[in-house]
């Protein structure tokens, strides 16, 4: 079995996570942990013309991240409430 991906949270994404209601933050954090087995994950979409490569849909939140397949690192860049300005 392959080694799982390492998940790194940017300072910005951690700040955004802390601003969420506690229950929502727990759900987002738990779902983000599934990225350890990326690309075998659900609710992922590759982004086009965006600063981040991918987004993970978690209810009404979007977790924006990059993936370096060579070193198996998921870099979580932002946690955003889904609205017209998310993308």
Image (tube, helix red, strand yellow):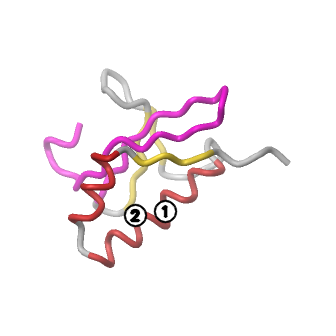
> The magenta stretch spans which residues?
61-87
Residue 31's disc number: 1
**Quick check: 55 left or right of 83?**
right
Image quarter for residue 84?
top left
Q: Is residue 70 magenta?
A: yes
> Is 55 positioned to the left or the right of 68 in the image?
left
Q: Secondary structure at mark 1?
A: helix
Name the foreground residue: 77 vs 40: 77
User: Looking at the image, is 22 positioned above or below residue 9?
Assistant: below
Residue found 37% across the figure and 44% down from its top? 10
Q: Outermost residue, right direction?
A: 1
Where in the figure is residue 5, as x and y percent of width and height? 64, 45
Q: For the C terminus, give its image quadrant.
A: top left
The residue positioned 26% from the left and 55% from the top of the image is 15
Q: Is residue 65 above or below residue 71?
A: below
Task: State if disc 2 and disc 1 touch (CB < 8 Å).
Answer: yes
The residue drawn where x is 36% and y is 41% is: 77
Q: Quadrant of residue 46?
A: top left
Which mark, residue 28? Answer: 2
């Amino acid at each position: 079995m392959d080694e799982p991906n390492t998940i790194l949270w940017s300072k910005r994404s951690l700040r955004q996570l802390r601003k969420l209601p506690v229950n929502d933050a727990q759900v987002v954090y738990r779902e983000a942990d599934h990225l350890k087995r990326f690309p075998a994950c659900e609710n992922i979409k590759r982004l086009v013309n965006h600063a981040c490569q991918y987004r993970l849909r978690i209810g009404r939140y979007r977790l924006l991240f990059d993936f370096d397949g060579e070193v198996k690192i998921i870099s979580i860049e932002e946690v955003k409430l889904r609205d017209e300005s998310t993308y």
